[in-house]
Amino acid sequence: MTDVWSNTNRASFMAITAYWITAATSTQNSTERTKLMLCADLIGFIHIPGWHTGEHLAHTFLHTLDHIHVTKKVVLPFEYSLEASLISISCIDWLGDFR
């Protein structure tokens, strides 16, 4: 999940949060049980110089994933919502070529 914003000095930033599910197996009374756990972590907090075009945001996002070596592990579950801006839709369209 990503979020982009500008501070009061008009400097822009992108935060990238990763979510994943892990399985933990435990044994209790000779019974093996598997418990699924949702995990989350901030994997990127990046200064974004320049314009917030969809292509620029997509490049920043992919550069960050490449930098931490998780690009091929990531599923891009972008949602089109009523609040999505044209820039977000442009970024989604541009990233669609990488699926």
Image: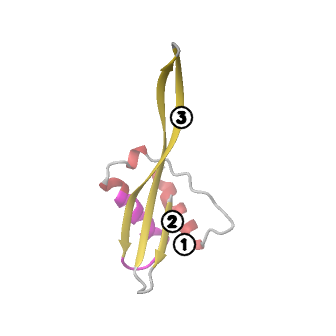
How many neighbours does mark 3 have within 10 angstroms: few (below 14), some (14-19), or many (20 or more)? few
Q: Is residue 11 above or below residue 35?
A: below
Instruction: Name the side, left or right, on which 52 lies relative to 49.
Output: right
Q: Magenta segment: does it hold 58?
A: yes
Q: Amino acid at mark 1?
A: Ile
Front in this rendered view, residue 51 or 93: 51
Q: Residues within 10 Å of mark 1 (few under 14, many from 20)?
A: some
Give the Cα separation between the discs numbered 2 and 3: 32 Å
CB under 8 Å between discs 1 and 2: yes
Image location (x, y in percent) of residue 2: 49, 62
Q: Quadrant of residue 82?
A: bottom right
| SS type, badge 1 | helix
83 drawn magenta = no
Of pointers 3 and 1, the one earlier in the residue sequence: 3
Residue 34 vs residue 87, the one in the foreground: 34
Q: How many numbered discs? A: 3
Magenta region: which residues? 49-64
What's the coloring here? Answer: secondary structure
Q: Position of residue 25 (x, y in %)?
A: 47, 25
Expressed as whole percent of the image width and height from the top left, the position of residue 11 reads 40, 81
Which kind of residue does numbered mark 3 sit on? Answer: Leu
Secondary-structure class at tag 2: helix
Pointer 2 residue: 91
Up-down: is 16 above or below 99? below
* The image quarter in which residue 49 lies: bottom left
Circle 2 crowding by C-alpha within 10 Å: few under 14, some 14–19, many from 20: many
For disc 1, the marked residue is 87
Q: Which residue is mark 3?
A: 36
Q: Amino acid at mark 2?
A: Cys
User: Compared with residue 76, is residue 8 higher up or lower down, i.e. above or below?
Assistant: below
Residue sitting at x 61%, y 57% = 79
